[in-house]
Image (cartoon, coloured by chain):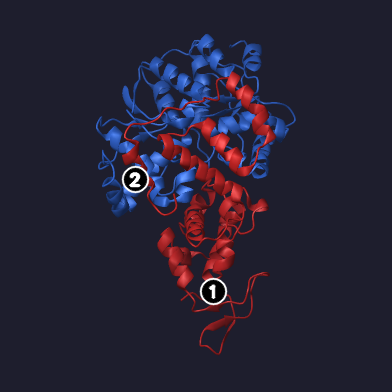
Chain colours: A red, B blue
Amino acid sequence: MVEPATTESSVAPTGATEITAMRPEGFPTIRTGDTDFLKLVLDESGEKIQACYQCHKCASGCPVASETDYTPDKLILLIQLGDEDKALRARHLQTCVACYTCSARCPNNINGARLVEALKQIAREEGIPPAKPKVDAFHDTFLMSVRHFGRVNEAELMGIYSLRAGFDWTTILKSPIMFLKGRLKLWGGRIRRLRMFRKLFANKNS
Amino acid sequence: METELTYYPGCSLHGSSSFYDTSVRTVLSRFGVSLREIEDWSCCGSTSASKTDHRLGIALPARNLGLAQKEGRAVLAPCSSCYSKLVAANVAMKEEPRLLKSINEELEYPYTSELPIRNILELLLDGLEAKDAPRIVNPLKGLKPVSYYGCLLTRIPGYEPKEDIENPVMMDKILKKIGADPIDWSYKTDCCGASSAVADRPVAINLIKKLLDEAIESEAMAIVTSCPMCQLNLDMYQEQAAPARPIPVYFITEMVGVALGLREEMKKEIRRHFVDGVSLLSELGVL
């Protein structure tokens, strides 16, 4: 049971507690007592997010804070309030660049980047479309290339990613220069016993 | 200092940053270090694997460490992303033994006893501080660079890095040892955006621009890094990020190589940068 300490609460008819005050703008009225989502996130991430006391250190160090919706502190609040929908549709699940600044600075040792990964994986399992599909398409294409050869073939990665996410002139114009500088290899090699290797990808998400 | 190391180049060093692989090998051979590449190594999964499937994010580096375990030596991974993922597999061995056990069941060579993972900065500094260190025949006098670590060399959850996580200084020490005059700045460990340069470009360009602008603001002549992703992003997207002037982005191994007198060898590699890195060093009379 999670009860934010700073909220005044009143007892709702169902017996659950309705939070009425100190609610950040845009956050819905949530009945505490609905901790299923919190438990799911705890299981998936292994991060003790109940320890968060909203110091916002993660947000102040987040390099993409100005371009995202919910920094880790806010994601944690959403989870604590049981707002599954907002947490799983957050743009931050894609905007996060996995720099681990939040993870390194959290006074309660919460690995924010790992939390984002876990939310992203739950969203995928539940079939929730990503807020920024191009980012997920990149990671999927990257892993597809790894599964094909055991190593990333950068030409394949960029080619297929362009087909999936749309052509991008910067990349197209740079490609010949990259090739001339020996920075674009058409063949990256492959590993042996790929069949056994591909078993590692058997998991639901990959 | 180890004289024989198991080597994990990773995909970047076999692809877009193959010239980093060359400078790593060339310079380390000068220190008397021989590198033996992991036979049949595969991708570490980088951020894409851990973002998609936590288990896969551990399984991919564990597969490589399982292969390396046969040799029993410390493993060098010059790429920061590879390095952090290999270390993450070591962290998982301690913190998630059940996960590693289940992964091991699917590996031909299970990863069962922890191998030390080394990064390129540790090796270079060890090499330069050794009693029989090669002579700095061509000190980089007059070069004022900023050292740029990026994210993944020091920020690895569950791992205590060998230097300060917010203000690492090993690269500055190396640069001083080879005669350069590194400038202190506040953005050493800020993020370059990594793969978002491809998948979420506006976000990445903002990050890249901040780094380039701050380097120029600190009156640095160049940026020095050890991460192929950082080098590529900061070097390749300068037209899009539009800093006040172009600024060369070198690998630390290129700097050490030049200082050790490997001018021609390093010139060949520096020519493969997008932003001209030859002129600055030539004007300083070191290349």
- Mark 1, chain letter? A
Along the horizontal axis of the image, is A119 left or right of B71? right
Give the farthest residue toward the right.
B244
Closest to the observer: A194 or A46?
A194
Residue placed most toward the observer, B115 or B222? B115
**Residue A63: where, in percent of width, then height?**
61, 47
Judging from the image, mark 2 belongs to the subunit labelled A
- Residue A24 position (above or below residue B233): below
Residue B215 location (% of width, % of height) = 66, 32
First of labels 1, 2 by sequence position: 1
- Say what secondary structure mark 1 lies in: loop
Relative to A47, say whether B69 is above or below: above
Residue located beneath label 2 in the image: A199
Mark 1 nearby-residue class (10 Å; few <14, some 14–19, many ≥20): some
What residue would you read off at disc 1? A4
Disc 1 versus disc 2: distance between alpha carbons?
44 Å
In percent of the image, x 43 and y 64: which residue is there?
A42
| Residue A25 appears in the picture as rendered | yes
Q: Residue at x 53, y 15 (%)?
A: B266
Question: x, y percentage for residue B246?
Answer: 70, 26
Q: Amino acid at mark 2?
A: Lys
Badge 1 and badge 2 both on one subunit: yes
Instruction: Tell me the SS state at disc 2.
Output: helix
Left or right for B201, reference B157 = right
Q: Residue at point 28% right, 42% down?
A: B107
Point out the residue furthest to the bottom here: A13
x%, y% of residue B170?
48, 31
Q: Which mark is residue A134?
A: none
Q: Residues within 10 Å of mark 2 (few under 14, many from 20)?
A: few
Please tell me which residue is depicted at 58% across the width and 27% down the height of the picture. B182
Q: Is residue B198 left or right of residue B245?
A: left
Q: The disc labelled 1 sits on which kind of residue?
A: Pro
